[in-house]
Image: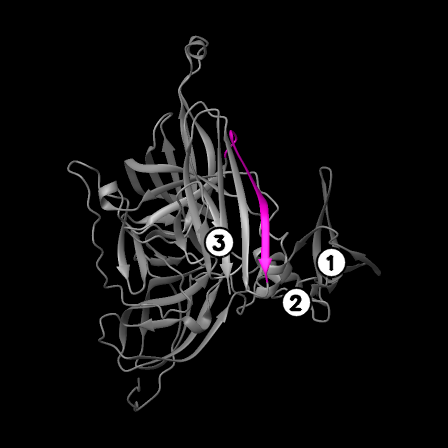
Amino acid sequence: MKIAAFAGVIYGTLLMGLAAADPSITIYNQNFAVVRDSVRLELKEGVNSVSVTGMTAQLEPDSVVLRDPAGKQQLQILEQNYRNDPVSQELLLSLNEGKTIDFLVRRGDVEEIVRGTIVRSGFMPGGQMNRRYQQPYQAAHQPIIDVQGKLRFGLPGLPLFPALTDDTVLKPTLYWVIETDKPGRLDGELAYITGGMSWLASYNLVAPEQGDRIDIVGWVTMENQTGKTFEKARIRLMAGDVSKIQPQVQDAMMFARAAKPEGAMAPAVTEKSFDEYHLYTVQRPTTLRDRETKQVEFVRATDVKSQRLYIYDGAQIDWNRIRHWSAEDLRSNRNYGTQSNTKVWVMREFENSKENGLGIPLPRGRVRFYRKDTPTEEEAKNGQAPQVEFVGENMIDHTPKDETVRVYTGDAFDIVGERKQTDYKVDTVRKWLDETVEITIRNHKEEEVEVRAVEHLYRWSNWEIRDNTDDFEKTDSRTIEFRVKIPKDGTKVIKYTAHYTW
């Protein structure tokens, strides 16, 4: 933008704070946020010197955008300076290095003044580091004070400083040199990126004592470590793996309300697709204080159909190691993959669909599982009330609607697996290999269970299953899965031979 030439240049110096209008914040789950706030400026035609306070302590100066949202006044920032050295005891000590000041010393009920010269303040702006070893100079943090000709490490008492100088800032401050084409009051919009703000999602899933219908409550947890309190802020949360994004300063997006049953309360958080990501909007303005963690419920669903899966992946395979092996290594090493894992995984799976009571994009977060425990008659007589017990947790990634959520929650206590190689034959001349595997799964529960035994055909890409005792499903080009039912206190043995050719 080019400002028209002026007949005369007028300089005015103004110290302003951010206006009282409600700020707007878009928080990303990557420890940063875009802040949009209003600033009221009294400008003269020409060039003005303006100081503005009230932004965060982790502002990215080169992300600052100042504009007239009404588009009536042309603005150009000729120069910008950002200072974030608010007054502290350490800073004032550094400003008075070499000077003699008073220190208030208390000994019981007696107070006296001791004069001391500040030889070294110990103040290290920006966390200076030992460049050679990338470690802070620990000793330099200690002030050195000369008291009556003797040096002492540490302060002799409470320092009493002279009055503040004009160039000392009490809070983070932006200094602008602004050129404008007309005088008057400007209700400008200030937008910038700041670090120190993040959010994450968490989900609580509660299942009854028997059955797999679950209730789901989802929370968003926002954390503010920016050094600034936002009063009655309009908050939006961006979900997705954002690599780099241009902040959309113009706040003109409309958000669709989530569908809700008749008579239900309006949701506290609504969701909207935005570009390749999803935006969640907190519907009511909320105050987000500095160093505060705030939680808002954003999803609630009842009677969600789910299923519990038992997965047995019996071969202990070091996939990081196997990546560096040649095909010949995999075929000739008959002992690879013969180490047996005994644990049977417990998985919880449900469809994120509208028909299943959900059907909204679920942002990445922690999922905690609980199951209700109904007391026995004896426990009830002793005053034991029904309660919910924690049975596992894990993380889910960003999950679009109509996709399946599957989460590992722990290992089964009463189901044990065993896998062993019973035969191995290889013919390097005719280029074939046969490996026979036996899988044994023991169920010590009081009910029948279904277990999915997963087998990885890692020896070579051309394979054929022979002499299998049970049917299997091919889940990908080198993985098969046996789904077998095991009666209570029963045992199931699965056998098969994998015939490889190359």
- Residues 62 and 232: in front is 62
Measured Cα–Cα span from mark 2 to mark 1: 14 Å
Q: Is residue 317 left or right of 488 when viewed as pictured?
A: right
Q: Earlier in the sequence, mark 1 or mark 3?
A: 1
Identify the image quadrant of residue 99: bottom right
Q: Earlier in the sequence, mark 2 or mark 1?
A: 2
Q: Is residue 321 left or right of 445 when viewed as pictured?
A: right
Q: Is residue 2 above or below residue 402?
A: below
Magenta-drawn segment: 412-427
Location of residue 421 in the rendering, given as x and y in whole percent from the top left corner: 58, 45
Residue that extends furthest to the right in the rendered view of this protein: 150
Q: Is residue 150 above or below residue 342?
A: below
Task: Give yes or no for residue 42 being in the magenta stretch.
Answer: no
Question: Is residue 289 in sight in this rendering?
Answer: no
Label 1: element kind: loop
- Three-letter code, disc 2: Gln
Residue at the location (62% across, 66% down)? 125
User: What residue is pinned by disc 3?
Assistant: 225
Label 3: element kind: loop
Colour theme: one colour
Q: Is residue 445 above or below residue 313?
A: above
- Three-letter code, disc 1: Gln
Crowding at mark 3 (Cα within 10 Å: few <14, some 14-19, many 20+): some
Residue at the location (75% across, 54% down)? 154
Task: Tell me the number on the disc at residue 142.
Answer: 1
Label 2: element kind: loop
User: What residue is pinned by disc 2?
Assistant: 128
Main structural element of the magenta stretch: helix, strand or loop? strand
Measured Cα–Cα span from mark 3 to mark 2: 21 Å
CB-based contact (under 8 Å), mark 1 and mark 3: no
- Three-letter code, disc 3: Gln
